[in-house]
Amino acid sequence: MNHKIYIDGNFFDQAEAKISVFDHGLLYGDGVFEGIRFYSDRVFRLEQHIRRIWNSARAIALEIPMSQGELIAAVLETIRQNDLHDGYVRLIVTRGTGALGLSPDSCRRPSIIIIAATIVLYPEELYQKGLTMVTSAIRRGSPAGLNARVKSLNYLNNVLAKIEAQAVGVGEALLLNEQGYVSECSGDNLFLVSEGKLATPPLHAGILDGVTRQVVFELAADLQIPVKERDLTRYDIYTADECFLTGTAAEVIPAVQLDRRLIGNGQPGPITAKLIAAFRELTRATGTPIYQ
Ligand code: PXG
């Protein structure tokens, strides 16, 4: 498919959509991004994603050269230009083109890139059987470095963790933080179910403030399932009744093994199933309309 790509206010055919090799997004990973889903002609939680990229940009002293409203309009227009109804938006803001050298002072203006495409989903079988996980040697999110809440263009720790998981034939990598507490997976937040209650690591564990994580808080409140944000160790996962991951790409997906130990009975559990159903219903029924 020939995608129409938005770059700095103009649309380009995929083959012509190019950025400079001097863009600091490429040279230094200096930039921020979002992954956003749309379902049945509505963009899911668009305002939350725009707010998050705004805060990611502020945290790295990058000023996005348009308003939040203009950015929302550009995302919607990019989907319309591609005549898509269900899919995925990758929104990227780079520091822009500059000189060789770390300083962003040489970069005249940040670049905004928007790609709207269809998405390759996890097979439905994984939602029925559950993902397997391994603990990665990579540690997540020291508060002494780049804050884990910044969705930056430097995802190398996450990529390395994913490579470790693939090397041992499992679906996801679990990252602990420097203190050894559970943080999150390579591109998803983590929840446990124990005695009918949900638990998930707090933001101070060094995690992305996931949009899907927030949605699960809301769904759990609707379903009267208590949720606690608390420090978790691998012990808590090994002994939990159920575990699931949340993310824009994966939505809500069961996780049934960590480090070859079965979680609960090794099958997706009933509370996870309830949340998956409620999440799917919400994605069909809510969101920012694209074509009206
Ligand atoms: N943690 C990390 C490190 C992430 O990158 C999440 C948690 C889940 O957050 P959301 O807001 O999506 O619920 C993410 C999100 C991709 C891709 O292309 C990755 C994400 C989102 C969309 C696409 O791999 N990561």
Image (cartoon, helix red, strand yellow):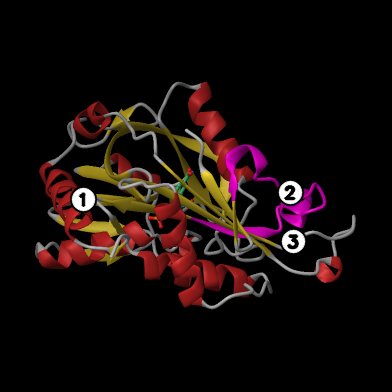
Where residue 246 sits in the image (x, y, percent)?
33, 50
Residue to which mark 1 is pinned: 193
Residue 213 colored in magenta in the image: no
The three-letter amino acid code for the residue at tag 1 is Val
Q: Secondary structure at mark 1?
A: strand
For the residue with label 3, is its CB less than 8 Å from the closest atom of ligand 1? no
Residue to which mark 2 is pinned: 26
Q: Is residue 143 above or below residue 259?
A: below
Point out the frontmost of discs 1 and 2: 2
Q: Is residue 62 above or below residue 261?
A: below
> Quarter of the image holding residue 211?
bottom left
* Sequence-earlier tag: 2 or 3: 2
* Sequence-earlier tag: 3 or 1: 3
The span from disc 2 to disc 3 (Cα, nearest Å) is 9 Å
Q: Secondary structure at mark 2?
A: helix
Residue 156 vs residue 185: left or right?
right
Residue to which mark 3 is pinned: 96
* Sequence-earlier tag: 1 or 2: 2
User: The C terminus appears in which quarter of the rendering?
Assistant: bottom left
The three-letter amino acid code for the residue at tag 2 is Leu
For the residue with label 2, is its CB less than 8 Å from the closest atom of ligand 1? no
Residue appearing at x 84%, y 60% in the figure:
98
Residue appearing at x 66%, y 75% in the figure:
63
Q: Secondary structure at mark 3?
A: loop
How packed is label 1: few (under 14 Cα within 10 Å), some, or many (20 or more)? many
Q: Which residues are magenta?
A: 12-34
Point out the frontmost of discs 3 and 1: 3
Residue 225 or residue 177, whichever sits in front: 225
Residue 38 or residue 266, whichever sits in front: 38
Can residue 240 be seen in the rendering of this structure? no
Residue 188 vs residue 214: left or right?
right
Residue appearing at x 50%, y 73% in the figure:
70
